[in-house]
Amino acid sequence: MHIVTGLILVSLAMVIAVGGLVLVQRLVPTERRQRHNDVAGFIYAVVGVAYAVLLGLMLIAVWEEWNEAEATTTEEANELAEIFWLAHRLPEPEGRHIQELARSYAEEVVNEEWPLMKQGGEGSARAWDYLDEMRGAIEQLDPSATDVPQVLYNQALLERLHGLADARKERLLDAEKGLPSILWVVLILGGAIAIGFTYLFGLENSLEHTLMVAALTMIFALTLFTVAALDYPFRGDVHVEPTAFEQVLERFETSELSHL
């Protein structure tokens, strides 16, 4: 979710909540509502705690998904870097070709794929092509016909390649993960009920009551906005950055182990 959109929705929720309170204050006398303060307070304590727990669990859930997506991105970049460094030990022209593919893959992910994911699109087809070319170049290597050690080929290059492909698939899956629609229905309705319950209290000072409702609504709305912003870790203004890939690209250009 975009930050400006979120702030507009938070402000709109506060206006609606305060407007509902003002309407209730005009239609139902304060003295009538004061009679039920004790009972309403007891029930609201249960409702408020239940909703706060639910809201907290959802916030923790999306935060854990965010951290998982960030860790997957770092893992993918690390696997790509290892393939690049190992390719330095390969004979020419195979080593240079694999390093060029690794750099092209990283550039495609940073420059093309990340903006696509930010807009809610799918992964780059060209990045898949670079990965397939890299796989073909590595699998075509014949350790027996070159100076490439068998252990370097089997346990290093192939394992890193498989790790890179798995991390990429997991990152693209993370980009599509989000809370189920039913949970959003529960969160929004639960917040509306929790705010609506505050209308049942009767306070002599209407201004204080209005400020309390506005503050409570702002807290609930900001938390819901945070959940929405973190829900899809690669979308919107608040998203996982391709920092790991940018650092890898920088090392590709400056490292002495580069054939490029």
Image: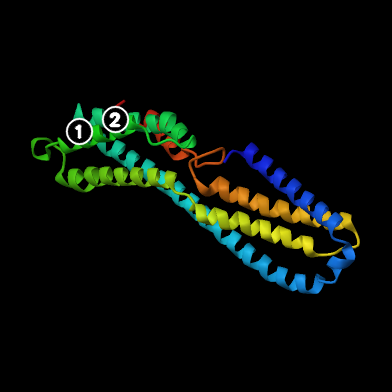
Element type where label 2 sits in the image: helix
11 or 229: nearer the eye? 11
Residue to which mark 2 is pinned: 101
Give how far across and how far down residue 104 sits, in percent.
34, 28
Which quadrant does the C terminus fall into? top left
Give how far across and how far down residue 18 sits, in percent.
78, 50
Q: How many marks?
A: 2
User: What numbered label is drawn on residue 119?
Assistant: none
Please report contact status of discs 2 and 1: CB closer than 8 Å, yes or no: yes
**Residue at (50, 42) in percent of width and height:** 240
**Residue at (81, 71) in percent of width and height:** 36
Give how far across and how far down residue 155 sits, in percent.
21, 48
25 or 198: nearer the eye? 25
In the picture, measured across the screen, residue 164 lies left or right of residue 204, that is left
Residue to which mark 1 is pinned: 137
> Which amino acid, mark 1?
Ala
Return the residue found at the far left: 145
Q: Mark 2: few, some, or many residues within 10 Å (few <14, many ≥20)?
A: many
